[in-house]
Amino acid sequence: MPKKTTIKKGNNKKTRRKLSFIQIIFLILAVLIAISFLFLSIYIPKRNKPNTKQTVNYSKSAPSFRKDGTLSIVPLQNPSSIQIDIEISDSEEERMRGLMDRFNLPENTGMLFIFPDESPRSFWMKNTFISLDIIYINSKKEIVSIQKYTQPKSLYSIPSEKPAMYVLEVIAGFTDKHGINPGDRIEFSY
């Protein structure tokens, strides 16, 4: 007959208590670690506020408008044309730079991008600090689409709705103010 083993009740309670105590310690440590991770994930360090008394002069580093020519927009609904001064952007380097790093664009001015062919176009607002209206124009010099009130510094693509050979960027709200719409025509000289 096999020998019966007996478990002493006193030792069993101590073992249970030790396990419970160890489990509680691990539970407390796990909670502390979770709270630490939570705190670190939502903590945003305070940034020093800029000195409001100090004036910043952007004109030294920012390019200024350069008048290269004039452009007329002839609305279908209005016989009188709208005249603006334009800066021409017709090289690859100039088209890539566009109105980047500028902090203002004078009223009744714009930048005219001239491409060698007519095809779908897409612009973005990287490093462009002013909101713009982007006017896409086909090879017949007809406005094919307008993207209004662009988001400054956005990396999202702002596509033409139809192929374009010219793109005119003007200050945001210009097209609404002057009633400019797709179908209107442009003429320019430089």
Image (spheres, grey):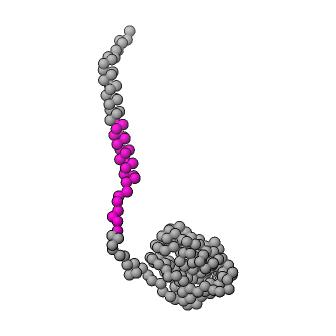
Give the main secondary structure, helix, strand or loop, of the magenta stretch.
Answer: helix
Q: Residue at x 36, y 37 (%)?
A: 27
Horizontal relation, residue 75 to residue 102: left or right? right
Q: Is residue 103 above or below residue 6?
A: below
Q: Is residue 137 above or below residue 27?
A: below
Of all residues shown, which one is farthest toward the top? 1
Q: Is residue 79 above or below residue 55?
A: below
Q: Which one is in front, 19 or 135?
A: 135
Residue 110 spot, x, y in % from top left: 53, 82
Residue 117 on the magenta span = no
Residue 179 spot, x, y in % from top left: 63, 78
Residue 106 spot, x, y in % from top left: 50, 82
Image quarter where the N terminus lies is top left
Horizontal relation, residue 18 to residue 151: left or right? left
Q: Which one is in front, 91 or 68?
A: 68
Q: Is residue 42 above or below residue 22?
A: below
Q: Number of callouts in the render?
A: 0
Q: Residue at x 34, y 42 (%)?
A: 32
Image quarter where the C terminus lies is bottom right
Magenta part of the protein: which range?
Answer: 26-50
Q: Quadrant of residue 80?
A: bottom right
Asked whether residue 90 appears in the rendered view, the answer is: no
Q: Residue at x 36, y 12 (%)?
A: 4
Q: Quadrant of residue 75?
A: bottom right
